[in-house]
Image (cartoon, grey):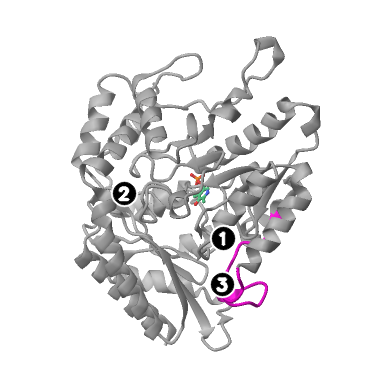
Amino acid sequence: MNGNNDNLKTDLNAADIEKIDREFVWHPFTQMSDWEKERNLIIERGEGVYLYDIHGNRYIDGVSSLWVNVHGHNNPELNSALKEQIDKIAHSTLLGLANVPSAILAEKLIEIAPGNLKKVFYSDSGSTSVEIAIKVAFQYFRQKGPKYKDKKKIIAATSAYHGDTIGSVSVGGIGLFHSIYKPLLFDTVRITYPYCYRCPYGLKYPDCALHCAKEAEKIIKVHAEESCALIIEPMIQGASGMITMPVGYLKKIERACKDNGVLLILDEVATGFGRTGKMFAAFHEDVSPDAMCVAKGITGGYLPMAATLFTQEIYDGFLGKYEDNKTFFHGHTYTGNQLASACAVKSVELFKKNGILNKMKPVIKRFNELLKRFYDLKHVGEVRNIGLMAGIELVKDKETKEPFAEHERIGHKVILKAREKGVIIRPLGNVIVLMPPLVIDENTLETLCSVVNESIEEVTQ
Ligand SMILES: *Cc1c(COP(=O)(O)O)cnc(C)c1O
Protein backbone atom coordinates (compact mmCIF):
# COMPACT_ATOMS: atom_id res chain seq x y z
CA MET A 1 0.00 0.00 0.00
CA ASN A 2 1.28 3.43 -0.84
CA GLY A 3 -1.24 5.16 1.40
CA ASN A 4 -2.83 6.74 -1.64
CA ASN A 5 -6.58 6.26 -1.74
CA ASP A 6 -7.09 7.86 -5.15
CA ASN A 7 -8.04 4.58 -6.81
CA LEU A 8 -11.04 4.29 -4.53
CA LYS A 9 -12.61 7.52 -5.73
CA THR A 10 -16.35 7.11 -6.16
CA ASP A 11 -17.17 10.76 -6.74
CA LEU A 12 -15.98 10.92 -10.35
CA ASN A 13 -18.40 12.68 -12.66
CA ALA A 14 -19.08 11.88 -16.32
CA ALA A 15 -16.44 14.30 -17.57
CA ASP A 16 -13.81 12.76 -15.28
CA ILE A 17 -14.56 9.26 -16.54
CA GLU A 18 -14.45 10.39 -20.14
CA LYS A 19 -11.11 12.03 -19.47
CA ILE A 20 -9.45 9.05 -17.82
CA ASP A 21 -10.85 6.68 -20.42
CA ARG A 22 -9.33 8.84 -23.12
CA GLU A 23 -6.03 9.03 -21.34
CA PHE A 24 -5.58 5.38 -20.37
CA VAL A 25 -7.79 2.99 -22.35
CA TRP A 26 -6.90 1.60 -25.79
CA HIS A 27 -10.23 0.37 -27.20
CA PRO A 28 -10.61 -2.81 -29.28
CA PHE A 29 -11.31 -2.58 -33.02
CA THR A 30 -11.23 1.21 -32.67
CA GLN A 31 -9.24 3.86 -34.50
CA MET A 32 -8.17 5.76 -31.43
CA SER A 33 -7.52 9.03 -33.25
CA ASP A 34 -11.26 9.08 -34.08
CA TRP A 35 -12.13 8.06 -30.54
CA GLU A 36 -10.11 10.92 -29.13
CA LYS A 37 -12.06 13.36 -31.28
CA GLU A 38 -15.58 11.99 -30.89
CA ARG A 39 -17.92 12.36 -27.94
CA ASN A 40 -18.02 8.93 -26.43
CA LEU A 41 -20.74 7.11 -24.63
CA ILE A 42 -20.05 5.76 -21.18
CA ILE A 43 -22.39 3.03 -20.04
CA GLU A 44 -23.26 2.97 -16.38
CA ARG A 45 -25.92 0.29 -16.03
CA GLY A 46 -28.30 -2.00 -17.86
CA GLU A 47 -31.82 -3.25 -17.38
CA GLY A 48 -33.43 -5.87 -19.60
CA VAL A 49 -32.75 -4.97 -23.23
CA TYR A 50 -31.75 -1.41 -22.30
CA LEU A 51 -28.43 0.25 -21.59
CA TYR A 52 -28.15 3.49 -19.62
CA ASP A 53 -25.31 5.95 -20.02
CA ILE A 54 -23.70 7.90 -17.23
CA HIS A 55 -26.10 10.81 -17.84
CA GLY A 56 -29.14 8.56 -17.44
CA ASN A 57 -30.02 8.33 -21.16
CA ARG A 58 -31.62 5.04 -22.19
CA TYR A 59 -30.74 3.00 -25.29
CA ILE A 60 -31.99 -0.26 -26.77
CA ASP A 61 -29.07 -2.71 -26.81
CA GLY A 62 -29.48 -3.59 -30.51
CA VAL A 63 -26.45 -5.89 -30.75
CA SER A 64 -26.68 -7.63 -27.36
CA SER A 65 -23.47 -5.94 -26.20
CA LEU A 66 -21.52 -7.48 -29.07
CA TRP A 67 -23.60 -10.62 -29.58
CA VAL A 68 -23.47 -11.95 -26.03
CA ASN A 69 -26.52 -10.91 -24.04
CA VAL A 70 -29.32 -13.48 -23.85
CA HIS A 71 -31.71 -12.93 -20.92
CA GLY A 72 -31.33 -9.15 -20.63
CA HIS A 73 -29.07 -7.03 -18.45
CA ASN A 74 -29.25 -7.02 -14.68
CA ASN A 75 -31.24 -10.24 -14.72
CA PRO A 76 -32.31 -11.03 -11.14
CA GLU A 77 -31.80 -14.77 -11.49
CA LEU A 78 -28.35 -14.53 -13.03
CA ASN A 79 -27.45 -11.94 -10.41
CA SER A 80 -28.54 -14.29 -7.58
CA ALA A 81 -26.64 -17.21 -9.07
CA LEU A 82 -23.50 -15.09 -9.08
CA LYS A 83 -24.05 -13.75 -5.57
CA GLU A 84 -24.62 -17.26 -4.27
CA GLN A 85 -21.45 -18.52 -5.89
CA ILE A 86 -19.27 -15.60 -4.83
CA ASP A 87 -20.06 -16.28 -1.18
CA LYS A 88 -18.56 -19.74 -1.64
CA ILE A 89 -15.55 -19.15 -3.89
CA ALA A 90 -14.73 -17.06 -6.96
CA HIS A 91 -11.98 -19.18 -8.46
CA SER A 92 -9.89 -22.27 -7.91
CA THR A 93 -7.92 -23.97 -10.67
CA LEU A 94 -9.21 -26.73 -12.94
CA LEU A 95 -5.61 -27.96 -13.44
CA GLY A 96 -5.59 -31.02 -11.25
CA LEU A 97 -8.71 -30.00 -9.30
CA ALA A 98 -12.41 -30.14 -10.09
CA ASN A 99 -15.06 -27.68 -8.98
CA VAL A 100 -18.81 -27.81 -8.51
CA PRO A 101 -20.34 -25.44 -11.10
CA SER A 102 -17.98 -26.36 -13.96
CA ALA A 103 -18.85 -30.05 -13.54
CA ILE A 104 -22.59 -29.29 -13.49
CA LEU A 105 -22.23 -27.00 -16.49
CA ALA A 106 -20.37 -29.62 -18.54
CA GLU A 107 -23.24 -32.08 -18.08
CA LYS A 108 -25.75 -29.40 -19.07
CA LEU A 109 -23.79 -28.43 -22.18
CA ILE A 110 -23.57 -32.03 -23.35
CA GLU A 111 -27.32 -32.36 -22.77
CA ILE A 112 -28.16 -29.49 -25.14
CA ALA A 113 -25.39 -29.99 -27.72
CA PRO A 114 -25.56 -32.19 -30.86
CA GLY A 115 -25.77 -35.80 -29.68
CA ASN A 116 -22.33 -37.11 -30.51
CA LEU A 117 -20.48 -34.47 -28.45
CA LYS A 118 -19.48 -35.94 -25.09
CA LYS A 119 -16.60 -33.96 -23.57
CA VAL A 120 -16.17 -30.32 -22.62
CA PHE A 121 -12.85 -28.45 -22.61
CA TYR A 122 -13.17 -25.00 -21.05
CA SER A 123 -11.42 -21.77 -21.89
CA ASP A 124 -12.24 -18.08 -21.71
CA SER A 125 -12.93 -16.59 -25.14
CA GLY A 126 -14.17 -17.59 -28.56
CA SER A 127 -10.64 -17.26 -29.89
CA THR A 128 -9.22 -19.70 -27.37
CA SER A 129 -12.05 -22.16 -28.00
CA VAL A 130 -10.97 -22.16 -31.65
CA GLU A 131 -7.26 -22.54 -30.80
CA ILE A 132 -8.19 -25.58 -28.72
CA ALA A 133 -10.23 -27.16 -31.52
CA ILE A 134 -7.33 -26.65 -33.95
CA LYS A 135 -4.64 -28.00 -31.63
CA VAL A 136 -6.74 -31.01 -30.63
CA ALA A 137 -7.55 -31.87 -34.26
CA PHE A 138 -3.87 -31.65 -35.16
CA GLN A 139 -2.64 -33.65 -32.17
CA TYR A 140 -5.39 -36.24 -32.60
CA PHE A 141 -4.02 -37.32 -35.97
CA ARG A 142 -0.36 -37.11 -34.84
CA GLN A 143 -1.27 -39.70 -32.22
CA LYS A 144 -3.53 -41.82 -34.42
CA GLY A 145 -0.64 -43.45 -36.26
CA PRO A 146 1.96 -42.99 -39.01
CA LYS A 147 -0.70 -43.40 -41.67
CA TYR A 148 -2.03 -39.96 -40.74
CA LYS A 149 1.31 -38.17 -40.48
CA ASP A 150 0.54 -35.79 -43.33
CA LYS A 151 -2.67 -34.48 -41.77
CA LYS A 152 -1.35 -31.10 -40.66
CA LYS A 153 -3.52 -28.54 -42.36
CA ILE A 154 -6.81 -26.92 -41.52
CA ILE A 155 -9.44 -26.23 -44.16
CA ALA A 156 -11.23 -22.93 -43.56
CA ALA A 157 -13.71 -20.76 -45.42
CA THR A 158 -13.09 -17.51 -47.26
CA SER A 159 -14.06 -14.38 -45.29
CA ALA A 160 -14.24 -16.44 -42.08
CA TYR A 161 -13.87 -14.94 -38.63
CA HIS A 162 -12.78 -17.19 -35.79
CA GLY A 163 -11.18 -14.71 -33.38
CA ASP A 164 -8.09 -12.56 -32.96
CA THR A 165 -5.37 -14.83 -31.63
CA ILE A 166 -2.75 -15.97 -34.15
CA GLY A 167 -4.16 -19.46 -34.68
CA SER A 168 -7.71 -18.21 -35.06
CA VAL A 169 -6.52 -15.43 -37.36
CA SER A 170 -4.75 -18.09 -39.47
CA VAL A 171 -8.08 -19.74 -40.19
CA GLY A 172 -9.76 -16.34 -40.57
CA GLY A 173 -10.18 -14.67 -43.90
CA ILE A 174 -11.12 -11.02 -43.45
CA GLY A 175 -8.50 -8.97 -45.28
CA LEU A 176 -9.09 -5.76 -43.33
CA PHE A 177 -8.42 -7.47 -40.00
CA HIS A 178 -6.05 -10.25 -40.99
CA SER A 179 -3.84 -9.51 -44.00
CA ILE A 180 -1.14 -7.58 -42.13
CA TYR A 181 -0.39 -10.62 -39.95
CA LYS A 182 0.15 -12.96 -42.89
CA PRO A 183 3.86 -13.54 -42.16
CA LEU A 184 2.91 -14.85 -38.71
CA LEU A 185 0.14 -17.21 -39.82
CA PHE A 186 0.10 -20.90 -40.69
CA ASP A 187 -0.94 -22.12 -44.10
CA THR A 188 -4.56 -23.18 -44.67
CA VAL A 189 -6.66 -24.72 -47.42
CA ARG A 190 -9.67 -22.60 -48.45
CA ILE A 191 -13.20 -23.38 -49.48
CA THR A 192 -15.47 -20.58 -50.69
CA TYR A 193 -18.14 -19.52 -48.22
CA PRO A 194 -21.42 -19.08 -50.10
CA TYR A 195 -22.54 -15.48 -50.55
CA CYS A 196 -25.65 -15.67 -52.69
CA TYR A 197 -26.11 -11.90 -53.04
CA ARG A 198 -22.68 -11.64 -54.64
CA CYS A 199 -22.22 -15.25 -55.76
CA PRO A 200 -18.51 -15.83 -56.43
CA TYR A 201 -19.52 -18.21 -59.24
CA GLY A 202 -22.02 -15.77 -60.74
CA LEU A 203 -24.89 -18.21 -60.20
CA LYS A 204 -28.37 -17.93 -58.73
CA TYR A 205 -29.94 -20.04 -56.00
CA PRO A 206 -31.66 -22.51 -56.38
CA ASP A 207 -30.82 -22.96 -60.06
CA CYS A 208 -27.16 -23.24 -59.08
CA ALA A 209 -27.91 -26.60 -57.42
CA LEU A 210 -25.39 -25.61 -54.73
CA HIS A 211 -22.44 -25.42 -57.09
CA CYS A 212 -20.43 -23.83 -54.21
CA ALA A 213 -20.90 -26.98 -52.13
CA LYS A 214 -19.73 -29.13 -55.03
CA GLU A 215 -16.61 -27.00 -55.38
CA ALA A 216 -16.01 -27.30 -51.63
CA GLU A 217 -16.48 -31.08 -51.80
CA LYS A 218 -13.76 -31.27 -54.48
CA ILE A 219 -11.34 -29.23 -52.38
CA ILE A 220 -12.01 -31.32 -49.28
CA LYS A 221 -11.40 -34.49 -51.27
CA VAL A 222 -8.21 -33.28 -52.94
CA HIS A 223 -6.72 -32.03 -49.65
CA ALA A 224 -8.06 -34.74 -47.31
CA GLU A 225 -4.72 -36.49 -46.95
CA GLU A 226 -2.97 -33.36 -45.70
CA SER A 227 -5.90 -31.94 -43.71
CA CYS A 228 -6.91 -32.78 -40.16
CA ALA A 229 -10.02 -30.63 -39.90
CA LEU A 230 -12.37 -28.16 -41.52
CA ILE A 231 -13.62 -25.22 -39.49
CA ILE A 232 -16.69 -23.23 -40.43
CA GLU A 233 -19.27 -20.83 -39.01
CA PRO A 234 -22.53 -22.78 -39.41
CA MET A 235 -25.54 -21.25 -41.22
CA ILE A 236 -24.30 -17.66 -40.98
CA GLN A 237 -20.89 -16.01 -41.11
CA GLY A 238 -20.95 -13.26 -38.50
CA ALA A 239 -18.12 -10.75 -38.69
CA SER A 240 -17.81 -10.92 -42.48
CA GLY A 241 -21.24 -9.26 -42.68
CA MET A 242 -23.94 -11.67 -41.52
CA ILE A 243 -23.73 -13.85 -44.62
CA THR A 244 -26.24 -16.68 -44.58
CA MET A 245 -25.71 -20.11 -46.12
CA PRO A 246 -28.21 -21.52 -48.59
CA VAL A 247 -30.22 -24.46 -47.27
CA GLY A 248 -28.39 -27.75 -47.77
CA TYR A 249 -24.85 -26.37 -47.94
CA LEU A 250 -23.77 -27.27 -44.41
CA LYS A 251 -25.12 -30.79 -44.70
CA LYS A 252 -23.05 -31.32 -47.83
CA ILE A 253 -19.92 -30.04 -46.11
CA GLU A 254 -20.55 -32.42 -43.22
CA ARG A 255 -20.94 -35.33 -45.63
CA ALA A 256 -17.74 -34.45 -47.49
CA CYS A 257 -15.78 -34.22 -44.23
CA LYS A 258 -17.06 -37.58 -43.01
CA ASP A 259 -16.45 -39.29 -46.35
CA ASN A 260 -12.89 -38.01 -46.50
CA GLY A 261 -11.76 -38.45 -42.89
CA VAL A 262 -11.55 -34.74 -42.15
CA LEU A 263 -12.83 -33.62 -38.73
CA LEU A 264 -15.63 -31.06 -38.80
CA ILE A 265 -15.26 -28.16 -36.36
CA LEU A 266 -18.29 -25.91 -36.04
CA ASP A 267 -17.57 -22.45 -34.70
CA GLU A 268 -20.82 -21.69 -32.86
CA VAL A 269 -19.29 -18.83 -30.90
CA ALA A 270 -21.75 -16.34 -32.38
CA THR A 271 -24.61 -18.67 -33.35
CA GLY A 272 -24.77 -20.74 -30.15
CA PHE A 273 -27.31 -20.40 -27.35
CA GLY A 274 -30.44 -19.60 -29.26
CA ARG A 275 -29.25 -16.74 -31.42
CA THR A 276 -30.48 -18.36 -34.65
CA GLY A 277 -33.76 -19.57 -33.16
CA LYS A 278 -32.41 -23.02 -32.29
CA MET A 279 -30.09 -23.78 -29.40
CA PHE A 280 -27.23 -24.32 -31.87
CA ALA A 281 -27.11 -23.53 -35.59
CA ALA A 282 -26.05 -27.14 -36.29
CA PHE A 283 -29.65 -28.18 -35.57
CA HIS A 284 -30.94 -26.30 -38.62
CA GLU A 285 -29.34 -28.96 -40.81
CA ASP A 286 -29.10 -31.80 -38.30
CA VAL A 287 -25.31 -31.73 -38.42
CA SER A 288 -23.11 -33.62 -35.97
CA PRO A 289 -19.69 -32.00 -35.72
CA ASP A 290 -16.57 -33.63 -34.28
CA ALA A 291 -15.87 -30.46 -32.34
CA MET A 292 -17.92 -27.40 -31.50
CA CYS A 293 -16.70 -24.04 -30.21
CA VAL A 294 -18.99 -21.99 -27.99
CA ALA A 295 -18.45 -18.74 -26.12
CA LYS A 296 -20.30 -15.41 -26.51
CA GLY A 297 -23.76 -16.33 -25.16
CA ILE A 298 -22.65 -19.12 -22.82
CA THR A 299 -22.93 -17.07 -19.60
CA GLY A 300 -25.95 -15.14 -20.89
CA GLY A 301 -23.54 -12.32 -21.68
CA TYR A 302 -22.27 -11.82 -18.13
CA LEU A 303 -18.73 -13.14 -17.92
CA PRO A 304 -15.98 -14.31 -20.25
CA MET A 305 -16.13 -18.05 -20.74
CA ALA A 306 -15.83 -20.51 -23.60
CA ALA A 307 -15.87 -24.22 -24.23
CA THR A 308 -14.86 -26.61 -26.98
CA LEU A 309 -16.94 -29.75 -27.11
CA PHE A 310 -15.57 -33.00 -28.55
CA THR A 311 -16.69 -36.50 -29.46
CA GLN A 312 -15.75 -39.50 -27.34
CA GLU A 313 -13.57 -40.74 -30.20
CA ILE A 314 -11.38 -37.64 -30.20
CA TYR A 315 -11.14 -37.67 -26.41
CA ASP A 316 -10.12 -41.33 -26.44
CA GLY A 317 -7.32 -40.49 -28.85
CA PHE A 318 -5.59 -38.62 -26.03
CA LEU A 319 -5.69 -41.47 -23.51
CA GLY A 320 -2.60 -43.49 -22.67
CA LYS A 321 0.24 -43.93 -20.21
CA TYR A 322 1.65 -40.57 -19.05
CA GLU A 323 4.99 -41.32 -20.67
CA ASP A 324 3.24 -41.90 -24.03
CA ASN A 325 2.96 -38.08 -24.14
CA LYS A 326 -0.61 -38.05 -25.39
CA THR A 327 -1.71 -35.51 -22.77
CA PHE A 328 -3.30 -32.35 -24.12
CA PHE A 329 -0.88 -29.85 -22.64
CA HIS A 330 -3.13 -26.85 -22.86
CA GLY A 331 -5.09 -24.84 -20.31
CA HIS A 332 -5.86 -21.21 -19.67
CA THR A 333 -5.42 -20.02 -16.12
CA TYR A 334 -9.07 -19.14 -15.52
CA THR A 335 -10.37 -22.28 -17.22
CA GLY A 336 -13.62 -23.46 -15.58
CA ASN A 337 -13.85 -20.39 -13.34
CA GLN A 338 -16.61 -20.87 -10.77
CA LEU A 339 -18.31 -17.49 -11.16
CA ALA A 340 -18.56 -17.83 -14.93
CA SER A 341 -19.62 -21.48 -14.64
CA ALA A 342 -22.33 -20.74 -12.06
CA CYS A 343 -23.66 -17.99 -14.29
CA ALA A 344 -23.63 -20.27 -17.34
CA VAL A 345 -25.44 -23.03 -15.44
CA LYS A 346 -28.17 -20.55 -14.53
CA SER A 347 -28.34 -19.22 -18.07
CA VAL A 348 -28.84 -22.70 -19.53
CA GLU A 349 -31.51 -23.39 -16.89
CA LEU A 350 -33.32 -20.18 -17.81
CA PHE A 351 -33.61 -21.35 -21.42
CA LYS A 352 -35.73 -24.24 -20.20
CA LYS A 353 -37.52 -22.52 -17.34
CA ASN A 354 -38.55 -19.49 -19.41
CA GLY A 355 -39.16 -21.45 -22.61
CA ILE A 356 -36.88 -19.00 -24.44
CA LEU A 357 -36.70 -20.87 -27.75
CA ASN A 358 -40.49 -21.18 -27.95
CA LYS A 359 -41.08 -17.59 -26.92
CA MET A 360 -38.69 -16.45 -29.63
CA LYS A 361 -40.78 -17.99 -32.42
CA PRO A 362 -43.38 -15.21 -32.79
CA VAL A 363 -40.66 -12.60 -32.19
CA ILE A 364 -38.58 -14.01 -35.02
CA LYS A 365 -41.64 -14.08 -37.24
CA ARG A 366 -42.24 -10.40 -36.52
CA PHE A 367 -38.53 -9.68 -37.04
CA ASN A 368 -38.69 -11.30 -40.49
CA GLU A 369 -41.59 -9.01 -41.41
CA LEU A 370 -39.91 -5.89 -40.04
CA LEU A 371 -36.70 -6.70 -41.88
CA LYS A 372 -38.53 -6.91 -45.22
CA ARG A 373 -39.46 -3.24 -44.85
CA PHE A 374 -35.81 -2.26 -45.17
CA TYR A 375 -36.00 -3.21 -48.86
CA ASP A 376 -38.10 -0.07 -49.40
CA LEU A 377 -35.00 2.01 -48.74
CA LYS A 378 -33.05 3.18 -51.75
CA HIS A 379 -29.67 2.02 -50.48
CA VAL A 380 -30.49 -1.35 -48.96
CA GLY A 381 -29.07 -4.07 -51.20
CA GLU A 382 -29.84 -7.15 -49.17
CA VAL A 383 -31.28 -8.01 -45.78
CA ARG A 384 -30.11 -11.34 -44.35
CA ASN A 385 -31.06 -13.06 -41.16
CA ILE A 386 -31.47 -16.30 -39.38
CA GLY A 387 -33.39 -16.04 -36.13
CA LEU A 388 -32.33 -12.91 -34.28
CA MET A 389 -29.05 -12.47 -36.17
CA ALA A 390 -29.47 -9.98 -38.99
CA GLY A 391 -27.38 -7.91 -41.38
CA ILE A 392 -28.60 -5.11 -43.63
CA GLU A 393 -26.17 -4.58 -46.50
CA LEU A 394 -26.08 -0.99 -47.71
CA VAL A 395 -25.08 -0.34 -51.32
CA LYS A 396 -24.43 2.78 -53.31
CA ASP A 397 -26.43 1.44 -56.22
CA LYS A 398 -29.12 -1.19 -55.85
CA GLU A 399 -29.08 -2.17 -59.53
CA THR A 400 -25.35 -2.73 -59.89
CA LYS A 401 -24.82 -3.67 -56.21
CA GLU A 402 -21.93 -1.21 -56.16
CA PRO A 403 -20.79 -0.92 -52.55
CA PHE A 404 -20.23 2.31 -50.67
CA ALA A 405 -16.53 3.17 -50.55
CA GLU A 406 -14.81 2.19 -47.31
CA HIS A 407 -13.77 5.79 -46.52
CA GLU A 408 -17.40 6.91 -46.58
CA ARG A 409 -17.88 4.91 -43.37
CA ILE A 410 -21.56 4.70 -44.11
CA GLY A 411 -22.21 2.04 -41.47
CA HIS A 412 -20.50 4.12 -38.83
CA LYS A 413 -22.61 7.16 -39.75
CA VAL A 414 -25.80 5.12 -39.47
CA ILE A 415 -24.97 3.83 -36.02
CA LEU A 416 -24.16 7.34 -34.77
CA LYS A 417 -27.52 8.55 -36.08
CA ALA A 418 -29.29 5.63 -34.39
CA ARG A 419 -27.54 6.48 -31.15
CA GLU A 420 -29.09 9.98 -31.20
CA LYS A 421 -32.43 8.18 -31.39
CA GLY A 422 -31.77 5.84 -28.47
CA VAL A 423 -30.44 2.71 -30.14
CA ILE A 424 -26.99 1.19 -29.80
CA ILE A 425 -25.76 -0.90 -32.70
CA ARG A 426 -22.38 -1.57 -34.29
CA PRO A 427 -21.81 -2.04 -38.02
CA LEU A 428 -19.58 -4.37 -39.96
CA GLY A 429 -18.36 -2.06 -42.72
CA ASN A 430 -21.39 -1.38 -44.90
CA VAL A 431 -23.53 -3.95 -43.11
CA ILE A 432 -25.77 -2.81 -40.28
CA VAL A 433 -26.04 -5.56 -37.69
CA LEU A 434 -29.17 -6.16 -35.65
CA MET A 435 -28.87 -8.77 -32.92
CA PRO A 436 -31.03 -7.94 -29.92
CA PRO A 437 -31.08 -9.98 -26.70
CA LEU A 438 -33.26 -13.09 -27.08
CA VAL A 439 -35.79 -11.75 -24.57
CA ILE A 440 -36.68 -8.64 -26.59
CA ASP A 441 -40.46 -8.19 -26.96
CA GLU A 442 -42.22 -7.40 -30.24
CA ASN A 443 -42.86 -3.75 -29.42
CA THR A 444 -39.28 -2.98 -28.56
CA LEU A 445 -38.15 -4.92 -31.61
CA GLU A 446 -40.42 -2.73 -33.70
CA THR A 447 -38.92 0.42 -32.18
CA LEU A 448 -35.40 -0.92 -32.81
CA CYS A 449 -36.20 -1.61 -36.47
CA SER A 450 -37.96 1.67 -37.12
CA VAL A 451 -35.14 3.71 -35.55
CA VAL A 452 -32.58 1.89 -37.68
CA ASN A 453 -34.79 2.26 -40.74
CA GLU A 454 -35.03 6.03 -40.23
CA SER A 455 -31.32 6.31 -39.48
CA ILE A 456 -30.37 4.56 -42.71
CA GLU A 457 -32.76 6.74 -44.66
CA GLU A 458 -31.47 9.99 -43.14
CA VAL A 459 -27.81 9.10 -43.60
CA THR A 460 -28.03 7.73 -47.14
CA GLN A 461 -30.59 10.01 -48.78
C1 LIG B 1 -16.70 -13.43 -31.75
C2 LIG B 1 -16.31 -14.66 -32.49
C3 LIG B 1 -15.12 -15.35 -32.18
C4 LIG B 1 -14.12 -14.83 -31.19
O1 LIG B 1 -14.60 -14.78 -29.90
P1 LIG B 1 -13.84 -13.87 -28.80
O2 LIG B 1 -14.54 -14.19 -27.53
O3 LIG B 1 -14.01 -12.45 -29.24
O4 LIG B 1 -12.42 -14.29 -28.81
C5 LIG B 1 -14.89 -16.54 -32.83
N1 LIG B 1 -15.74 -17.01 -33.76
C6 LIG B 1 -16.87 -16.37 -34.09
C7 LIG B 1 -17.79 -16.97 -35.09
C8 LIG B 1 -17.19 -15.16 -33.49
O5 LIG B 1 -18.30 -14.49 -33.85
- Residue hosting label 3: 196
Q: Which residue is mark 2?
A: 70
The residue mark sitting in front, 3 or 2, is: 3
Of 125 and 319, the residue lying toward us: 319
Q: Earlier in the sequence, mark 3 or mark 2?
A: 2
Stretch in magenta? 190-209
* Label 3 secondary element: helix
Amino acid type at circle 1 is: Tyr
Q: Disc 1 designates what residue?
A: 249
Q: How many marks?
A: 3
Q: Position of residue 270 (x, y in %)?
A: 45, 51
Position of 122 with respect to 6 (left or right) is right
Q: Secondary structure at mark 1?
A: helix
Q: Which residue does the image show at 34% across and 80% down from the upper left?
A: 373
Q: Quadrant of residue 401?
A: bottom right
For label 2, the SS is loop
Between 226 and 89, which is closer to the camera in this rendering? Answer: 226
